[in-house]
């Protein structure tokens, strides 16, 4: 079975418990990270915004509530989208089942592309960044949130938390120990923030930056698609 199919089935299986587990695992800090992401997106009325890996719609719904933007939420998990569409004000969002590797949108469709916890889960990171750049309008912004492998002074306690506490919580609360073991394993195998920033530059993004949270185990990255046709991704 392909990695993508396995991950899709995993997210389908935990969709009804996903939000609760996020709040518990992060001690509620996930809301703070998402608000920072939204702030970095520099939203303005009328902008077209795509939220990839929208999951149960936290980011998409928050953007719609805080701005007069046209928001599309996309995810390849039908289970996650089913829960998103049951939430308050979900009718204000356009929901689309889609794979980030092959987005079903024309070139230059969106002013902003945002995502939370996407890149760690994809099979072809460079290909997904290229797709994001393709659907962005020239001058458009990408802002993404993801986990980072523990490093630095907090590496040991953070690693222990990832390897022991997260799978344990997944078993006790989420009833899905393997899913949350995957979260731990994929976090530790992912890129450092500096490495991901370079991947973005390699794909043609400009003005790339990032902000770390939670002792460097979470990062929000941002980058801009070039305005000039000769410099586009």
Image: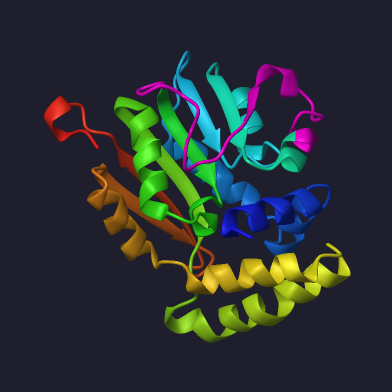
Residue 70 horizontal side relative to residue 56, left or right: left
Q: Quadrant of residue 87?
A: top right
In the image, which residues are magenta? Answer: 82-109
Percent x, y of residue 19: 76, 49
Q: Pick the residue in front: 214 or 178.
A: 178
Q: Say above or below: 107 vs 7.
A: above
Q: Pick the residue in front: 131 or 24.
A: 131
Percent x, y of residue 73: 60, 30
Percent x, y of residue 24: 76, 61
The residue shown at (59%, 54%) is 4
Residue 112 horizontal side relative to residue 179, left or right: left
The residue shown at (50%, 82%) is 155
- For the C terminus, the quadrant is top left
Q: Residue pushed farthest bottom? A: 156
- For the N terminus, the quadrant is bottom right
Magenta region includes residue 85: yes
The residue shown at (82%, 29%) is 86
């Amino acid at each position: 079975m392909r990695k993508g199919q396995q991950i899709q089935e995993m997210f389908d299986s935990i969709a009804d418990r996903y939000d609760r587990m996020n709040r518990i695992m992060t001690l509620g800090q996930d809301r703070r990270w998402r608000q920072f992401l939204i702030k970095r997106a520099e939203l303005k009325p009328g902008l077209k915004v795509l939220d990839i890996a929208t999951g149960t719609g936290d980011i998409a719904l928050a953007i719609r509530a805080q701005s007069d933007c046209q928001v599309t939420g996309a995810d390849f998990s039908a289970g996650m989208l089913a829960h998103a569409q049951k939430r308050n004000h979900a009718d204000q969002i356009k929901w689309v089942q889609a794979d980030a590797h092959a987005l079903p949108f024309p070139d230059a469709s969106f002013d902003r592309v945002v995502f939370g916890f996407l890149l760690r889960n994809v099979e072809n990171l460079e290909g997904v960044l290229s797709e994001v750049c393709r659907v962005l309008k020239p001058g458009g912004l990408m802002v993404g949130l993801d986990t980072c492998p523990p490093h630095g002074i907090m590496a040991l306690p953070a690693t222990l938390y990832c390897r022991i506490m997260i799978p344990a919580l997944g078993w006790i609360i989420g009833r899905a120990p393997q899913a949350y073991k995957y979260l731990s394993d994929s976090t530790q195998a992912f890129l450092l923030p500096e490495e991901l920033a370079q991947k973005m530059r390699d794909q043609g993004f400009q003005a790339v930056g990032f902000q770390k949270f939670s002792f460097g185990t979470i990062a929000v990255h941002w980058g801009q698609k070039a305005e000039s046709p000769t410099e586009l991704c």
